[in-house]
Amino acid sequence: MVTGPPRCDTGVVADSPDSYGRHVVNRIDGDVRGSAVQIGFLDIGAHYHAAPRAPAEWPHQVGVIPPRALAFQHRPEVDRLRAAPGGTRLLTGTGGVGKTQLAADHARNLWAQGELDVLVWISASSRQAIVAGYAQAGLEVLAADPDQAARAFLAWLEPKAGQRPCRWLVVLDDLADPADLRGLWPPNSPHGRTVVTTRRRDAALLGAGRHVLPVGLFTPWDAAAYLGSVLAAHDRREPVDQVDGLAADLAYLPLGLAQAAAYLVDAGLGCADYRRLLADRIRKLAHLLPEPGALPDDQVATVAATWSLSIERADLLRPVGLARPVLELAAMLDSNGIPQAVFTGLAVNRYLRRRAGDDDAVGALRVLHRLSLIDHHPDTPLRAVRVHHLIQRATRDALDQRDELAVTAGKALDWDWPDDPSRDAAQIQIANIDALVAHGEDALWDGERRQVFVMKGRELGALGLFAAAERHFHQLAAASHRRLGPDHHDTLAARSYHAEWRGRAGDPAGAAAELADILVDRERVQGRAIDSIEVRTAHSHLAHWQGQAGDPAGAVATIAEVVAAQRAGALRTLTDTAIREFFTLSRRLASWRGAAGDPARAVADLTAILAEYPRARQGFVDTVRHPRAHWRGVSGDPTGAMVELAELLAEQERALGPDHLEVLVLRHHHAHWRGVTGDPTGAAAELAGVLADRDRLLGPTHSHTRMTRAHLSYWHDAATHPAEAAPSTRLLPELQQTLSP
């Protein structure tokens, strides 16, 4: 116990601090593990007793603070640390975000401003290192008995009545495992402060007086300022846009920016050249960073090596062996957000059982989160998993082969994507598909996971980006032709998808002409046999776009041929799926007859379908009753149309929920017929609700949202100025943005 003015002694501390640290760990834990360690301690103890120390004078520093990084940036965390008067601050974050530099800056500032009597800096990479650091402090500050130095120092930090107050700071840098601090946490003191830097986010780190300060990436401004300052220190001037671009390419990771700057300075490269190398996915990240001996700011590990130990440690935690394969899967997808369902579905479960014998993907995600290798937030299910893209790249670089990973990820995106019709879900799915294609396109083609390419086009269309969907399928058809040949099933399917979105993008006549050519090729490859579902589907699609192009009679002729051929066959021998398809085609035929000028025949045919196929009424009913209500209204019975739609709407809301897109379509059409029956005010009110929901779910530019906005405008005007309500003028502005001329 120090009760008087401490004295200073600059004598030699010890010849073998590692041996001493090992012994003190054993002594503190109550487990001296063998004579060899004891003998080492006795030798060191004899040395200490031969050269007794005196307590050091204050102010006194124990340990070496890491040097200040070149172009150190003042960040918000500096101010938050400064504002904390006492207790323990936990700086948490992934490797490379600058936790150590922030702690070092805080320690230097307090020391320089005379606010500390004792400063202790300890590398906390193991329990042994922590105890050795405490023991060193006990020896220097207290001149304690070597056998009790660590315990004595911890006890001395505890405030006591009558003891001279000491303003102390203990920094435990890079804590690897919360268990290493069990029983070794510095006490809460009105005069003392503790700062712990760690990649861990375990609940065990929290306790009385401990507060977490998450450390994130640089802001874009800070990253550009840092990079520009480092280059300027080497007499390098780079275009501002290239500096900003490189900062973004490295996703604002401080360590990545420091090492990239050192590499391009040593290699004599400009930012633009370095960015081109970085964009080359064939090059490994390690080849674009300095060698270990050329790292800046006394760094000891490259970006990739910084994370490798965390990955190894994560793989040893329960569920053992799953963290690495789950991180590898995440490395194939979008860094900005992956749904949790992708990791917990059938595709990944099967993969993990083959790879590690267990399928606890959620447990693995939590382990990766605890070690700051990912951010896992299950309360945001669509973006539950986020990974820094440099961690992803370093993880991919370590793979021996990635084909199975790519195929597994493709299956997960196809089979296990959450059933969410929202605009956000579509955008996230497209981003994940793009990432997967970028990292494993060849495997997706060879592994017959080509469905992911189709999924992207469909999601583009779901966003209302019809022209983008058309371009995507045009490129897909060309790639399929090149890789698989002109007559391959997937090539013909891609051409059909292109024609579909060509029509939706505003060229129905072009879509019909293209589908007619595809039908010729299908019949050449597969024959005219009506039992080929592809041929029947081609007839159906051709009929649709013939009708949309202004030829409903041609549509009737095209699809009637297929329906007649199916009806002539023995329907009772077909599968339930084939029977359902027959009635689907029959329903489309009825609708085109209505469009061709015979709405009463359409109503009769659709009614007959419902009577002939009662099994369909659970899932098929809306596809028949909905158009029947429409043609009933067109044939002169708008009240009947509204009543049937109201009944169907109530059923579908119960079955699908109020936000389902099909429910919104029914609400829109119900409002329309309500207006036609003579209630424009009610129609406008109903459409206002539909518009609010479509705007929320689909966005203001989606074609369905625009159509609803246009119809709302019409019925609003019909309710307020009946004489002026002319569809040709009121609907035109919105429809011009949505439909073809």
Image: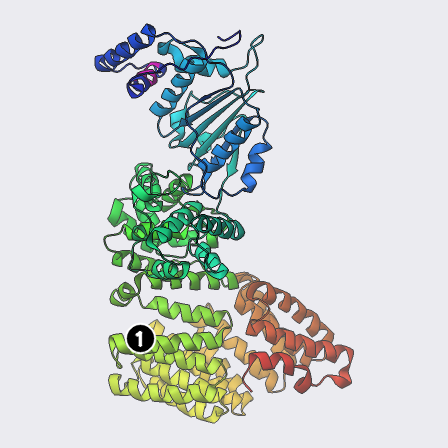
Depicted 696 relative to depicted 187: above or below: below
Q: Quadrant of residue 628?
A: bottom right
The front one of 45 and 29 is 45
Residue on which disc 1 sits: 479
Report the span colored magenta. Answer: 23-27
Is residue 396 in the magenta section?
no
Q: Quadrant of residue 178?
A: top left
Measured as percent of width and height from the top left, residue 456 is found at 41, 68
Measured as percent of width and height from the top left, residue 22 is found at 30, 19
Depicted 103 relative to depicted 571: above or below: above
Is residue 63 toward the left or the right of residue 483 in the image? Answer: right
Amino acid type of the residue that numbered disc 1 sits on in the rendered structure: Ala
Taking the spot 45% from the left edge, 86% from the top edge, the residue there is: 545
Query: Is residue 322 something that shows in the picture?
Result: no
Name the outermost residue toward the left: 36
Taking the spot 48% from the left edge, 57% from the top edge, the residue there is: 244
Query: Is residue 227 something that shows in the picture?
Result: yes
